Amino acid sequence: MRATVDHDLCIGDAICESICPQVFELGDDGLSYVIADPYPADLQGEVEEAVESCPTDAIAIHQDDADIEDRLLKSIRSK
Ligand code: F3S
């Protein structure tokens, strides 16, 4: 899975970094950056907690692009 931070919404609250510093790090501009992309599966709980705790809903979780590509290819090949 991948996490993204919408920099139009992030206000640098840093809750994400304090909950899951392995995935989120505040940059010099005061905004949060994803430093593990994709992030390890064992951090799923912390990333979800960060999503729920962000006051501006700036964080989103996405399926790994490779997973989606893989499923699309399989579905095309099975037709
Ligand atoms: Fe920004 Fe939300 Fe983290 S405002 S710094 S993404 S907790």
Image (tube, grey):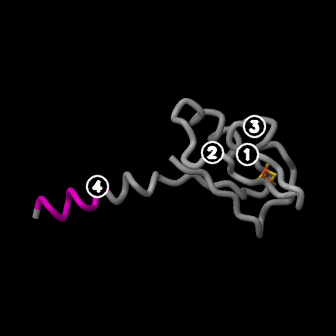
Q: Quickly name the residue at label 3.
A: 21
Whole-Å distance between the Cαs marked 2 and 3?
10 Å
Is residue 22 located in the magenta-colored stretch of the structure? no
Q: Are marks 4 and 3 in contact (CB under 8 Å)?
A: no
Earlier residue among tags 2 and 3: 3
Q: Determine whether, in the image, residue 53 is placed left or right of residue 63.
A: right
Residue shown at the point (57%, 42%) measured from the top left: 39
Q: Is residue 47 above or below residue 74?
A: above
Q: Quickly name the residue at label 4.
A: 71
Residue shown at the point (77%, 65%) measured from the top left: 9
Disc sitting over residue 52 in the figure = none
Whole-Å distance between the Cαs marked 4 and 2?
23 Å
Residue shown at the point (84%, 46%) measured from the top left: 14
Q: Quickly name the residue at label 2.
A: 36
Earlier residue among tags 4 and 3: 3
Location of residue 19 in the rendering, given as x and y in whole percent from the top left corner: 76, 35
Whole-Å distance between the Cαs marked 4 and 1?
28 Å
Which amino acid type is marked by label 3?
Pro
Ligand 1 near label 2 (Cβ, under 8 Å)?
no
Q: Determine whether, in the image, residue 75 is placed left or right of residue 78.
A: right
Whole-Å distance between the Cαs marked 4 and 3?
31 Å
Q: Quickly name the residue at label 1.
A: 24
Q: How packed is label 1: few (under 14 Cα within 10 Å), some, or many (20 or more)?
A: many
